[in-house]
């Protein structure tokens, strides 16, 4: 009888992993511990810096990785002839394999829609599969602690529960396609300034309740196959070398059975392997900008020789990764590229962008515009926001789209589809406003004006201020005063200051809409789609209203040890929790978002079968569309804790998005389960290193935002 081998797909992933490891030589194990940039053997037209070469002797395929989290980003396939001439393009290139550029992750968060997160993840998983990729470095689950964060567009906003819910659905969808999802950046990587030497000083309770919670949810509820450890330090320990975060919390407390990959060049010594970092990337095996590869055959052999590592340590790291690869079928499918569903995925991207757009203001129901009553419309804005589609922020998440739809093209396409003969013109305002007078004159004679503004951001640096750059505030103020029928489209990373708000009757936050930019925006403005997004971040009236205003809090100060010390001194009070606790009125609250229709809440109910945390709490509310168009509302449930708990006034613990026809009513049921991975009633006890539910009176708060409260009910737990 022929003995079984690891290629036998009928065996369990665990058995196949054991058989594969037993068939490998030590040198082969060394080779598999780290990436090695170059030509992809199975795809000789592709060169990249995001793969581990396969082992032909054993039939192990090349293991290929792509960046997320706003689509298939820089993805291990730059034309080989280009890289041969310009090696610097290996990691980042506008010639990287193309994919659908989706709306930013913060736009997805604004949908407050689990189904939207599933569809978003499905596209990323399918297109990764089409491009013969095995790992999607997504979702990004760091929090928007401050609106200045350079990568806020990659994340889901300021609330850990909302972040966790959206991330769970995305991870499930990606992995349903047989692609490994990799929540990142673990952990407390909320800023970009000196990120490789940033030392986040954070209280253990705050760490678990805010910054680790989304990761915990993706592991316990979505069975995430991998986690990316980040560049920064937490409480003095570099994360990829931190046994507390990587072993005690991740594996012992949460039961994680996947593998940990380093962010690129995040490993700083071989001790990372012992701490729990299983896989190092990218593996140039030479010094690059002061960074080096550690998991080399030479270093691993030396560590075995001096006893600091054992072969069992190496086997364990490979076992963790191979187990997930077998589980998701990666060993059993060829590395072959197949066509993408470009048309279908573009249509989904449009719908996602429409759902994520947030109508902040709509005085006198200026929107939606009625095309039949408009002879001409003028689009006005700076080049980055008006002349080009805003496909995303800068950095490794950048998706190279097959095509883009800028504003002018999108408006013309939408009007043509409507059968309207409205004339659309575009005035691009110079960055220094030298031709602003021309734009103002164009606005005066237009039947309607659409201002296109925003603020770009990118990986590796944070924003110094959250005012709109390149003199856009002056542009908005002058143009909006020239024509009362002015609608402003904002395309930015997170919250922005709005000194001109009183003079602008309608404001739509579109975030970074992706390749379908112009189509998304125009369909929303003409009412072909109804805005249904809700803010995943709080908008302040001034920067002084924000929670981290001292330099040591943001962006931190460089200490004597050379690390940038960033103190999370605001504790649990970030976002709406800060504004609640300090009794500060925001410009626009978390959860805010208008619609072209109206809704009414009634028949509230809060029930549980036991008041001892042993049973879920069921919140019900009847929602009625009292307007004349189809639209969506998001009932939001917050929880206020007993006074002795030391918690902010409330936290988000549940929500649901519901679409209703005009006049339609429906009962919405939201369950708050004390046993859920989100710990809705939980307070983390740092001394015991465990979560606990405290007895006392809790307020169940139902609203349409963090400040628009519709009903509050008190329940007492023993």
Image (cartoon, rainbow, N blue to C red):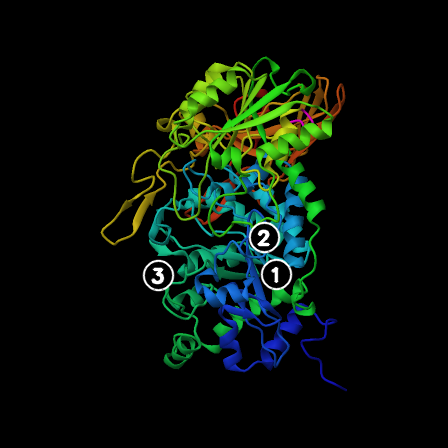
How far apart, in angstroms, are the residues tagged by discs 2 and 3?
26 Å
Q: Label 2: which residue?
A: 72
Residue closest to the eye, 674 or 269: 269
Q: Quadrant of the N terminus?
A: bottom right
Q: Is residue 657 visible?
A: no
Q: Label 3: which residue?
A: 289
Instruction: Name which quarter of the figure residue 132 lies in.
Output: bottom right
Instruction: Name which quarter of the figure residue 612 lies in.
Output: top right
- Mark 1: few/some/many CA within 10 Å (<14, 14-19, 20+): many
Secondary structure type for disc 2 = loop
- Mark 2: few/some/many CA within 10 Å (<14, 14-19, 20+): many
Q: Position of residue 281 (x, y in %)?
A: 47, 64
Part of the protein shown in magenta: 527-531
Q: Is residue 87 visible?
A: yes
Secondary structure type for disc 1 = loop
**231 displayed left or right of 213:** left
């Amino acid at each position: 009888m022929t003995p079984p081998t690891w290629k036998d797909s009928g065996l369990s992933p665990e058995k196949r992993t054991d058989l594969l490891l037993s068939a490998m030589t030590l040198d082969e194990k060394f080779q598999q511990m780290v990436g090695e940039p170059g030509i992809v053997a199975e795809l000789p037209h592709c060169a990249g810096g995001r793969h581990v070469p396969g082992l032909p002797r054993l039939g192990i395929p090349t293991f290929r990785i792509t960046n997320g989290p706003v689509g298939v980003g820089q993805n291990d396939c730059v034309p080989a002839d280009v890289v041969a001439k310009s090696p610097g393009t290996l990691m980042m290139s506008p010639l990287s394999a193309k994919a659908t550029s989706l709306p930013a992750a913060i736009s997805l968060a604004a949908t407050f829609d689990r189904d939207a997160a599933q569809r978003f993840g499905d596209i990323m998983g399918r297109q990764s599969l089409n491009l013969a990729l095995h790992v999607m470095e997504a979702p990004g689950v760091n929090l928007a602690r401050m609106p200045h964060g350079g990568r806020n567009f990659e994340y889901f906003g300021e609330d850990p529960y909302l972040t966790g819910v959206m991330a769970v659905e995305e991870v499930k969808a990606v992995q349903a396609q047989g692609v490994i999802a990799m929540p990142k950046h673990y952990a407390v990587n909320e800023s970009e300034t000196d990120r490789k030497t940033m030392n986040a000083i954070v209280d253990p309770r705050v760490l678990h309740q805010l910054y680790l919670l989304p990761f915990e949810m993706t592991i316990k509820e979505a069975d995430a196959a991998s986690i990316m450890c980040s560049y920064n330090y937490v409480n003095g320990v570099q994360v990829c070398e931190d046994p507390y975060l990587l072993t005690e919390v991740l594996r012992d407390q949460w039961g994680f059975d996947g593998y940990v990959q380093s962010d690129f060049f995040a490993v700083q010594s071989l001790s990372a392997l012992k701490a729990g970092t299983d896989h190092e990337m990218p593996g140039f095996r030479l010094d690059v900008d002061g960074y080096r590869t550690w998991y080399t055959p030479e270093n691993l052999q030396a560590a075995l020789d001096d006893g600091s590592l054992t072969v069992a340590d190496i086997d364990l790291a490979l076992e963790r990764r191979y187990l997930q690869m077998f589980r998701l079928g990666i060993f059993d499918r060829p590395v072959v590229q197949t066509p993408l569903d470009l048309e279908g995925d573009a249509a989904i991207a449009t719908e996602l962008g429409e759902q994520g757009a947030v109508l902040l203001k709509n005085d006198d129901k200026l929107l939606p515009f009625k095309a039949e009553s408009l002879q001409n419309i003028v689009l006005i804005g700076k080049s980055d926001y008006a002349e080009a589609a805003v496909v995303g922020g800068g950095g490794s998440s950048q998706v190279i789209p097959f095509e883009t739809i800028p504003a002018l093209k999108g408006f013309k396409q939408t009007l043509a589809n409507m059968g309207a003969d409205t004339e659309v013109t575009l005035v691009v305002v110079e960055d220094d406003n030298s031709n602003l007078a021309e734009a103002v004159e164009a606005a005066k004679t237009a039947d309607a004006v659409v201002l296109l503004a925003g603020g770009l951001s990118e990986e590796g640096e944070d924003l110094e201020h959250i005012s709109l750059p390149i003199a856009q505030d002056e542009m908005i103020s002058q143009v909006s005063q020239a024509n009362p029928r002015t609608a402003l489209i904002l395309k930015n990373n997170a919250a922005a200051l709005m000194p001109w708000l009183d003079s602008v009757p309608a404001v739509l936050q579109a975030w970074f809409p992706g390749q379908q930019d112009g189509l998304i925006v125009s369909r929303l403005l003409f009412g072909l789609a109804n805005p249904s997004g809700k803010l995943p971040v709080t908008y302040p009236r001034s920067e002084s209203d924000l929670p981290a205003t001292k330099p040591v809090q943001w962006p931190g100060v460089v200490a004597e040890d050379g690390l940038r010390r960033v103190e999370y001194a605001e504790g649990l009070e970030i976002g709406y929790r800060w504004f609640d606790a300090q009794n500060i009125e925001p410009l626009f609250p978390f959860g805010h978002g208008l619609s072209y229709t109206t809704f009414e809440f009634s028949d509230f109910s809060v029930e549980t079968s036991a008041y001892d945390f042993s049973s879920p709490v069921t919140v019900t509310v009847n929602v009625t569309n009292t307007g004349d168009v189809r639209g969506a509302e998001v009932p939001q449930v917050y929880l206020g804790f007993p006074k002795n708990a030391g918690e902010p006034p409330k936290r988000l613990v549940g929500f649901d998005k519901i679409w209703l026809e005009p006049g339609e009513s429906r009962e919405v049921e939201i369950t708050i389960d004390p046993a859920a991975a989100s710990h809705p009633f939980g307070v983390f006890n740092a001394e015991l290193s465990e979560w606990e539910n405290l007895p006392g009176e809790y307020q169940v708060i139902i609203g349409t935002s963090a400040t628009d409260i519709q009903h509050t009910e008190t329940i007492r737990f023993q």
